[in-house]
Amino acid sequence: MDLTLFYFVHGFAGLSAWGDALIVFFAETYLYVVLLVFVFAALRAYMRTRQMFSIINYGIALAAAIVARLGVTEVIRHFYHNDRPYTAIAGLSHLINDTASSFPSGHTIFIFALAAAAHFFNKKLAYFLYASGVMIGIARVAAGVHYPSDIAGGIVLGALTGVIVYILARKVIYSLNLPRHTQPELHQQ
């Protein structure tokens, strides 16, 4: 099933120059656009209140994404190596080079951890992040650097990491007994 879905999605690569450029954009560059939107949302939250604590939720979400990408992903890759499709399948064309193990997708785990944590305090932003994560994941399969199972693993592990890190960080913050007006709110935006 994984290979069948891989070949279907990867079949969109190589059809046209502009199509390949679009795949590469979503597979490599779009993550930076998403991060700019995230930073803009955090700055907007700060501008509304002019208090640094108004953006602490954004900091926690970013920390969750970093833990997912640099912690969870690297631990899994240390113990489990899965070749990239273009190295495992002889003669497979690819649009991007990446030599690391393919499971889980580092891009996908990062975005879904960010989205799952953001879901607690800014649902609109979280939905944008979820959709962006799916687009990035599909593009990375089309580019020949991930199997669909790598993307699915990144989605599940990223979402779990985002929720766990966010909840633990919030407990730590509230255990500090800061004055109530300085504690970040959990309200929805």
Image: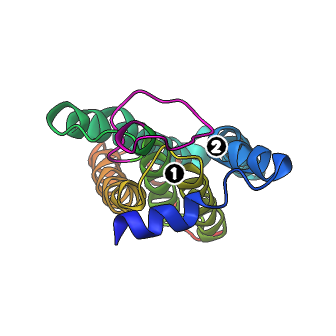
Quarter of the figure with the C terminus: bottom right
* Closer to us: 131 or 126: 131
- Image spot of residue 26 (x, y percent): 68, 49
Give the residue pinned by disc 2: 31
Q: Which residue lies furthest to the right in this view?
A: 18
Amino acid type assigned to the residue bearing label 2 in the image: Leu
- Image spot of residue 141 (x, y percent): 52, 54
Could you say which quadrant of the image residue 153 lies in? Answer: bottom left
- Identify whether 124 is placed above or below 37: below
Q: Residue furthest top?
A: 99
User: What residue sits 31% from the left and 40% below the top?
Assistant: 73
Give the residue pinned by disc 1: 111
Q: Which element is circle 1 on? A: helix
Q: Residue furthest front?
A: 91
Do residues under tags 2 and 1 come within 8 Å of each other at their CB atoms? yes
Q: Residues within 10 Å of mark 1 (few under 14, many from 20)?
A: many
Q: Can residue 163 be seen here? A: yes
Q: In screen coordinates, is 98 left or right of 22?
A: left
Q: Residues within 10 Å of mark 2 (few under 14, many from 20)?
A: many
Amino acid type assigned to the residue bearing label 1 in the image: Ile
Chief SS of the magenta region: loop
